[in-house]
Image (spheres, rainbow, N blue to C red):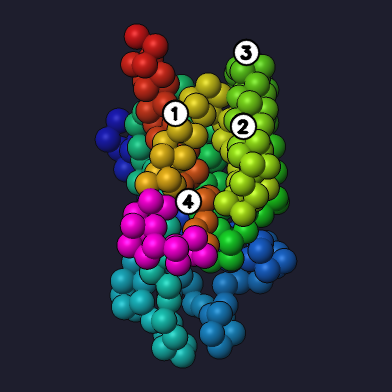
């Protein structure tokens, strides 16, 4: 089992690199199929040996070889995070290959939208739609019995957050609603503790900012996508256990 987890980790590093490219290109209307990676600062093509996930950033000390421009720490952090989440997902779902693959797609989607929300304050529909299609493509043939529950969770979670947006439109956006619905599709009933954790984490950060900055905190834009992503990860890895604990 240790060998499989290790393989998942290194595969996750490559997936994290791809996720970073998706998060950079999709909001800018660029193709994810090509061209090869280019330096955002000077436009020079990045050599393959400078594009090794995580390790290249460490070797280059966070600066582009071509022009010395600083490379955001978010990219190696994303690669490492996705790698760890892939390893954890394979470990948790080692007895259910279909659920493991669904989980790998899910954490990759969460990583991508976290980056786009942090950098651009948007959650692209293309990423969510692609994730939903992949989820159904796996669930329909291999886990048909879960489809009704997944659909109900998507409608319920998305509808709940939609009501929150209607009540407080300045606090969240429709991107958060669509992300929550997508989480319901992936997680099923485990979306409940995921959404609860996201709301608690977001509220806690908001209260801390209000305590520190007073009325100025109300003008600070805090993306909610990363909090939903955090809840989604917990829902994936421990959501069913939390539900069983609560119901028991």
State the separation of the CA atoms marked 1 and 2.
13 Å
Can residue 130 be seen here? The reply is: no
Residue 204: horizontal and vertical position, in percent? 37, 47
How far, Cα to Cα, is label 4 from label 2?
Answer: 18 Å
Horizontally, residue 51 falls left or right of residue 125, namely left
**Which residue of the protein is positioned furthest toward the left in this rendering?**
2
Indicate which disc, 2 or 3, sits on the residue closer to the N terminus.
Answer: 3
Q: Quadrant of residue 87?
A: top left
Q: Are marks 3 and 4 in contact (CB under 8 Å)?
A: no
Q: Which structural element holds mark 3?
A: helix
Nearer to us of marks 4 and 2 is 2
**Which label sits in the foreground, 2 or 3?**
2
- The disc, 3 or 4, on the residue closer to the chain's N-terminal end is 3
Q: Residue at x 38, y 51 (%)?
A: 207
> Which residue, as the protein is rendered here, is positioned at the far top?
248
Q: Which residues are magenta?
A: 206-220
- The residue depicted at 30 percent of the width and 30 percent of the height is 1
Q: Nearer the viewer, mark 3 or mark 4?
A: 4
Dot 2: element: helix
Query: Residue 109: image x %, image y %?
Result: 55, 46
| Residue 162, percent from left and from top | 66, 38
Residue 211 appears left or right of 198: left
Residue at label 2?
160
Mark 1 or 3: the one toward you = 1
Say which label, 1 or 3, has the lower sequence index: 3
Q: Nearer the viewer, mark 1 or mark 2?
A: 2
């Amino acid at each position: 089992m240790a060998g499989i987890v290790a393989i998942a980790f290194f595969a996750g590093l490559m997936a994290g690199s791809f996720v970073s490219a998706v998060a950079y290109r999709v909001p800018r209307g660029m193709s994810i199929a090509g061209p090869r990676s280019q330096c955002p600062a000077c436009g020079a093509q990045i050599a393959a040996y400078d594009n090794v996930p995580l390790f290249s950033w460490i070797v280059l000390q966070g600066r582009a070889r071509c022009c010395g421009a600083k490379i955001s720490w978010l990219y190696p952090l994303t690669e490492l995070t996705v790698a760890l989440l892939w390893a954890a997902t394979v470990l948790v779902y080692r007895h259910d290959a279909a659920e493991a693959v669904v989980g790998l797609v899910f954490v990759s989607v969460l990583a991508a939208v976290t980056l786009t929300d942090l950098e651009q304050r948007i959650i692209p529909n293309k990423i969510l739609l692609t994730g939903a299609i992949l989820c159904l493509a796996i669930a329909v043939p291999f886990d048909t019995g879960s489809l009704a529950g997944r659909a109900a969770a998507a409608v319920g979670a998305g509808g709940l957050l939609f009501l929150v947006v209607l009540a407080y439109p300045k606090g969240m956006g429709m991107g958060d609603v669509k992300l929550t619905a997508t989480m319901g599709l992936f997680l099923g009933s485990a979306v409940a503790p995921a959404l609860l954790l996201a709301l608690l984490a977001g509220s806690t950060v908001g209260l801390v900012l209000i305590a520190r900055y007073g009325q100025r905190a109300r003008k600070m834009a805090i993306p909610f996508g990363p909090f939903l992503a955090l809840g989604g990860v917990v829902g994936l890895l421990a959501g069913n256990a939390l539900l069983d604990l609560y119901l028991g």
